[in-house]
Image (cartoon, rainbow, N blue to C red):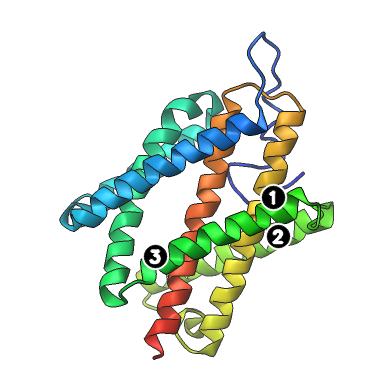
Amino acid sequence: MRSANPALNSKTFSSTRNISNEQPMTIDGTVNKTALSLLLLMTSAIYTWNNLELSFIYFLPIIISTFVLLLITIFNKRAAPYTVPIYCLLEGGLLGGISAWADDMYPGIANQAICLTFGILAALLMLYKSKLIAVTDNFRLGIFAATFGIFIVYMLNILLSSLFEISFANSLFSNDLPGILFSVFVVGIASLNLVLDFDFIEQGANQGAPKYMEWYGAFGLMITLIWLYIEILNLLMKLRSRR
């Protein structure tokens, strides 16, 4: 099995066999942990939205802290019940600031992005549960390759523009037709990553992974949802800027 999500890869559950008397991971338990994670994220996002100056003051420290927590959680999955709630609170602070900034330029855009994100989540969950989307090895490989390609494009753009002031694939990040089509493609790939996340969580429950992996499964879903929301927001901003 393979997933483009850094938190849910082919070795996620194979190295966490439940060899003790600990309760096993369940789908319902993971859903509950994901709901709590979303609640924490939205609570801090609303707070930051109403206290926008804080997001600018603590922007860099929060980015560093979330990256550290992400690494700790990935390499020490047993810490997930403690690190994931903090990670969600910090990410919510970032998203609240970003959303408020975008909504100030284009009123109502944040609510549109939120509705689209949850709409895509619900639609793909229904498609997955009804088996209308088959998670095959080729499907996993295709999504992994596309996600990795997007990652390379973003990294090259950041490195070349910041270190050498070179514009890389400038048309892909503009509000012109190529930029909009690229954003639509990225939103599509981010959405399909949710299907891989559903599949890996189901596999973990079927394999009897330990209880703390419910938090880790929620963590993987939150990473994808945050990425999807940001990409939808970016796409909507491109579309609104053309008016």
Q: Earlier in the sequence, mark 3 or mark 2?
A: 3
Q: Which one is in front in this view, the residue at disc 1 or the one at disc 2? A: 1
Three-letter residue code for mark 1: Leu
Secondary structure beneath label 2: helix
Residue beneath disc 1: 196
Query: Residue at 83% across / 57% down in the picture?
Result: 138
- Choose top left, top right, bottom left or bottom right for residue 185: bottom right
Query: Residue at 32% across / 44% down in the picture?
Result: 43
From the top left corner, tell me how far across and down residue 229 is, in percent: 47, 61
User: In the displayed structure, would residue 77 be above or below residue 163?
Assistant: above
The Cα atoms of the two marked residues, 1 and 3, are separated by 26 Å
Q: Which one is in front in this view, the residue at disc 3 or the one at disc 2? A: 3
From the top left corner, tell me how far across and down residue 80 is, in percent: 50, 29
Contact, mark 3 vs mark 2 (Cβ under 8 Å): no
Residue beneath disc 2: 143
The Cα atoms of the two marked residues, 1 and 2, are separated by 9 Å
Three-letter residue code for mark 2: Ile
User: In the displayed structure, would residue 237 be above or below residue 131?
Assistant: below
Three-letter residue code for mark 3: Asn
Q: Quadrant of the C terminus?
A: bottom left
From the top left corner, tell me how far across and down residue 19 is, in percent: 71, 13
Dot 2 alpha-carbon crowd within 10 angstroms: few under 14, some 14 to 19, many 20 or more: many
Query: Residue at 58% across / 81% down in the picture?
Result: 181
Q: Is residue 137 left or right of residue 41?
A: right
Q: Is residue 121 left or right of residue 115?
A: right
Q: In the rendering, which numbered label is found on residue 111?
A: 3
Q: Which one is in front in this view, the residue at disc 1 or the one at disc 3? A: 3
Contact, mark 1 vs mark 2 (Cβ under 8 Å): yes
Dot 3 alpha-carbon crowd within 10 angstroms: few under 14, some 14 to 19, many 20 or more: few
Q: Earlier in the sequence, mark 1 or mark 3?
A: 3
Secondary structure beneath label 3: helix
User: In the displayed structure, would residue 36 be above or below residue 169?
Assistant: above
